[in-house]
């Protein structure tokens, strides 16, 4: 299904839909298990990097399998969106639309304003013929996500959002208010030390509220919203990893954002961390294991636990299926 009804309900209900990236079967299984157990709608998203890694045809069929799998697990009416994350060209978006994606993002945020509008409008005009919903982006997020990277962020300008959403016809808008991509969202210098923990600068809620005032009820999307749990980082480092100064967005701030017009929150790094932590721990404790199922099973369990935690304690989308 596309995101239209899902977002309408999320904005009205003061919660957000989880958008989890996936590249592997185990991530997909963990996402579906978590969504079914919590009775939550879910967006499964695929980046250009995921397509390069796993092949677009395989990912698409995994997503089709996800719907059948959810039904097998006892969910009669699963609400699953297959979404393209950070489409960077009309051609890529068209390819996904032609091949069964129910939602796409066109990210023209690095382009000059007018070019961003022209590109987004072209994708919207094509996508809407097939009832595929489109996310566009205004403002630039810092950080690295697959092939998307920017050295510094530029907050979304609230004075542009009405013009942009009207002229593009986009269904949702990704904004920049201080989140960023990757597991190293902030440098320690940008943070304040509170009780031995580095606390990053708060999200720009003033900008978010200004945007909400300009576009009442319009679905807003937050990218780069992993919290980078210290527990997983510590496990990785304890068992031979070397992650330095990994810092994410505090969950309380995401919970706060989910109550507003923010109705889609993207989480990718936390799944990577959960998977890596479980695999490192398992292999360190069972040096004789070499069957991938032995270490991918705890990895899948750990991701599922993380997804459920996000759905229930951060986004509030549990129990929100329409039927
Ligand atoms: Zn992103």
Image: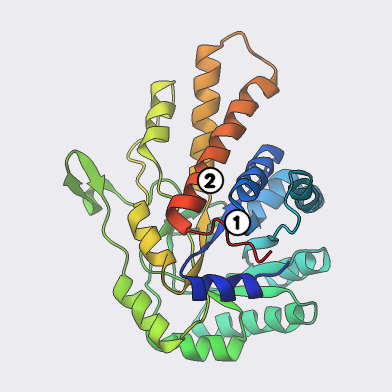
Residues at marks 1 and 2, CA–CA distance in whole angstroms:
9 Å
| Mark with earlier residue (1, 2) | 1
Q: Which of these two is toward me, 303 or 71?
A: 71
**Hey, which residue is sitting farthest front in the picture?**
323
1 sits left or right of 152 in the view: right
Q: Of helix, strand and loop, which one carries label 2?
A: helix
Rendering coords of residue 137 (x, y %): 52, 73
Regarding residue 281, the answer to whether it shows in the image is yes
Rendering coords of residue 271 (x, y %): 53, 42
Report if the beta carbon of the residue with label 2 is closer than 8 angstroms to ligand 1.
Answer: no
Q: How many marks?
A: 2
Q: Residues within 10 Å of mark 1 (few under 14, many from 20)?
A: many
Q: Residue at horizontal 72%, vertical 51%?
A: 75
Q: Which residue is mark 2?
A: 308
Q: Residue at horizontal 49%, vertical 82%?
A: 217
When the figure is inspected, residue 231 is found, relative to residue 12, above or below; the finding is above
Q: Which residue is mark 1?
A: 40
When the figure is inspected, residue 16 is found, relative to residue 124, above or below; the finding is above
Q: Which of these two is toward me, 233 or 122?
A: 233
Q: Residues within 10 Å of mark 2 (few under 14, many from 20)?
A: many
Rendering coords of residue 135 (x, y %): 60, 73
Regarding residue 151, the answer to whether it shows in the image is no
**Hey, which residue is sitting farthest top in the picture?**
288
Q: Residue at horizontal 44%, vertical 21%?
A: 240
Q: Which of these two is toward me, 194 or 263?
A: 263
């Amino acid at each position: 299904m596309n995101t239209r009804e899902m977002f309408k309900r999320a904005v009205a209900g003061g919660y957000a839909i989880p958008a989890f990236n996936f590249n592997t079967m185990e991530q997909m299984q963990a996402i579906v298990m978590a969504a079914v157990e919590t009775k939550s709608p879910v967006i499964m998203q695929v980046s250009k990097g995921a397509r390069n890694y796993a092949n677009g045809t395989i990912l698409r069929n995994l997503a089709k399998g996800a719907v059948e799998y959810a039904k097998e697990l006892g969910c009669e009416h699963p609400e699953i969106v297959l979404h393209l994350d950070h489409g960077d060209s009309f051609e890529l978006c068209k390819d996904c639309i032609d091949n069964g994606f129910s939602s796409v993002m066109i990210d023209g945020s690095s382009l000059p304003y007018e070019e961003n509008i022209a590109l987004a409008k072209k994708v919207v005009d094509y996508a809407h013929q097939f009832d595929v919903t489109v996310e566009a982006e205004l403002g630039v997020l810092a950080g690295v996500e697959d092939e998307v990277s920017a050295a510094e962020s530029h907050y979304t300008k609230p004075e542009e959002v009405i013009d942009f959403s009207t002229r593009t016809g986009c269904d949702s808008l990704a904004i920049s208010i201080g989140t960023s991509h990757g597991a190293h969202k902030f440098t320690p210098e940008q943070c304040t030390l509170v009780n031995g923990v580095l606390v990053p600068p708060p999200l720009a809620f003033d900008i978010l509220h200004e945007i909400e005032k300009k576009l009442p009820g319009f679905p807003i999307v937050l990218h780069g919203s992993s919290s980078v749990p210290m527990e997983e980082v510590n496990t990785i480092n304890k068992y031979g990893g070397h992650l330095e100064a990994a810092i994410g967005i505090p969950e309380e701030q995401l919970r706060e954002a989910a109550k507003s017009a923010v109705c889609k929150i993207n989480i990718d790094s936390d799944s990577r961390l959960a998977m890596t932590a479980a695999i490192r721990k398992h292999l360190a404790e069972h040096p004789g294991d070499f069957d991938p199922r032995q270490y991918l099973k705890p990895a899948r369990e750990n991701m599922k636990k993380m997804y459920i935690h996000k759905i229930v304690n951060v986004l509030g989308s549990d129990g929100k299926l329409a039927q």
